[in-house]
Image (tube, grey):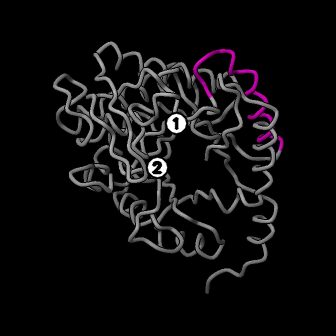
Amino acid sequence: MASQTASTDGLATTTTIEHYANLANSGAGLVIVEYSYVMPSGKSEPNQLGAHDDKCIPGLQQIARAIHEKGAKAGFQLTHCGGKSQLDVCPDLEAPSGITVPAYDRVLPKPQAMTLDDMYAWRDAFVQGAIRAEKAGFDFVELHCAHGYGLNQVLSPVTNKRTDFYGGNLQDRARLMIEIVQTVKKETKLNIMVRVPGQDLYPDGLSQTDMAEVCRLLVEAGVGIIDVSSGIGGWNRPKDRRGEGYLVSESAYLKKANLGVPIIGVGGIETHGYIEQALQNQWFDLAAVGRAVLQGPQQFQQRVMKEPLPA
């Protein structure tokens, strides 16, 4: 989850490093560093962390070291905003088809349609970002293909109307993601996770059936963990969903698809009891906890240790 503590050119600051050292006090087995842009045209927020330049590596090394010192594995999330930003942050806003990205909480500007060379540039930038993460000492890299950001825009029929081999049917819309995964596998020894939408949760968007097929393609390409979140509509809680695990029905669907890799469930997960219940019911294999940890990592760990397990 974005800390907005980086410098305006995307470099980690002392505050960023201390933030992740603190989060690792939660007792989590894996700490995933916030979404970090892979090229200047992919920046979403003014003080967003970057992986777009070798100058980022020293700060990222300190983050990975801080996480490892607390006994956790370190993951690093890579993103490109595509058309989901504002022009004052990203003047060269670009997206697969030049379609305004729908968002429930804001009105976004219309991006430029990408050329084929632009698509190749995205692919290369994600690979280079992963290489930098490996040089910095991270154990995992996660491609952010959810929440309506760039790779979600490429994957979704709502925002991808391309007529070349990166558009059209589901397999072609997934092609860019597959190529990124295959190249990262070739160029690094990193474990690869992908944060996917369980479905777009938007009219005429990606369905759960679509995402089961996409995830099979990703696993075949070398993905080792599937992290299931929301899609084109954004990261906000759907208005008709309440309580803990408000996106866990999507992870449970993919869990039943027998993809052969661990599935991460997300969505307002806060308690040990809920996590154990979900594990027993095979709704997911791993639980992602965000806000409950941000409120106080050590307090979260202490609370979890004291909570009784479900009967």
Q: Position of residue 307 (x, y in %)?
A: 73, 78
Give the number of the disc on residue 261.
2
Q: Position of residue 207 (x, y in %)?
A: 26, 54
Q: Residue furthest top?
A: 117
In this rendering, does residue 185 appear at all?
A: no
Q: Residue at x 36, y 51 (%)?
A: 233
Per the image, label 2 sits on a secondary structure element best described as loop
Amino acid type at circle 2 is Val
For residue 84, say whether it is visible.
yes
Image: magenta residue range: 50-69
The type of residue carrying mark 1 is Ile
Overall secondary structure of the magenta section = helix
Q: Residue at x 61, y 87 (%)?
A: 311
- What number of labels is visible? 2
Q: Which residue is mark 1?
A: 192
Image side of residue 178 versus residue 267, left or right: left
Give how far across and how far down residue 296 sits, in percent.
Answer: 77, 60
- Determine if the magenta segment contains residue 24: no
Instruction: Using the image, determine if residue 116 lies above or below residue 48.
Output: above
Mark 1 to mark 2 CA distance (whole Å): 11 Å
Task: Say which element carries label 1.
Answer: strand
Outermost residue on the bottom side: it is: 311
Residue depicted at 29% across the width and 54% down the height: 202
The part of the image, by quadrant, that contains residue 271 is bottom right
Could you tell whether 280 is left or right of 150 in the image?
Answer: right
Q: Is residue 68 inside the magenta stretch?
A: yes
Q: Position of residue 165 (x, y in %)?
A: 21, 24
Q: Is residue 190 above or below residue 262?
A: above
Report the residue at 70% width, 32% height from top. Answer: 6
